[in-house]
Image (cartoon, grey):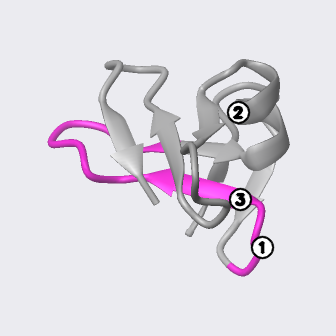
Amino acid sequence: MTGECYYCRGIVLANEDDDILLDDHADHQVYMHKQCGESYNVIKEQTGSTATVEIICPECGAVETR
């Protein structure tokens, strides 16, 4: 996984823990840095679980849980 962050246009790398690829969509993939997603409020921790987060795709609005 290597691509361009949807928000800052920086490089998103496969081996970085804070880099995200949203790929459960039929016609597009979205790369983003965790910090960028949090600053745009598309990444939110689920209540009661520190390990699970919801990520909203900025392209289509679909929600992925990780």
Q: Which residue is mark 1?
A: 16
Q: Element under label 3?
A: strand
Please tell me which of labels 2 and 3 falls first in the chain: 3
Q: Which residue is mark 3?
A: 19
Q: Is 36 positioned to the left or the right of 51 in the image?
A: right
Q: Is residue 3 magenta?
A: no
> Could you say which is closer to the camera, residue 61 or residue 11?
61
Q: Which residue is mark 2?
A: 37
Residue 36: which disc? none
Kind of residue sitting beneath label 2? Gly
Kind of residue sitting beneath label 3? Asp
Looking at this rendering, what residue extends furthest in the left direction? 26
Spatial CA span between label 2 and label 3 = 10 Å
- The quadrant the N terminus occupies is bottom right
Q: Is residue 18 magenta?
A: yes
Looking at this rendering, what residue extends furthest in the bottom direction? 15
Spatial CA span between label 3 and label 1 = 5 Å
Kind of residue sitting beneath label 1? Glu
> Could you say which is closer to the camera, residue 65 or residue 7?
65
**Dominant secondary structure of the magenta stretch?**
loop
Spot occupied by residue 40 in the image (x, y as percentages of width and height):
73, 18
Report the span colored magenta.
15-30
Spot occupied by residue 22 in the image (x, y as percentages of width and height):
43, 49
Spot occupied by residue 35 in the image (x, y as percentages of width and height):
84, 41
Q: Element under label 1?
A: loop
Spot occupied by residue 2 in the image (x, y as percentages of width and height):
62, 64
> Could you say which is closer to the camera, residue 8 or residue 42?
42
Q: Element under label 2?
A: helix
At a point 62% along the width and 66% down the height, the residue shown is 51
Spatial CA span between label 2 and label 1 = 15 Å
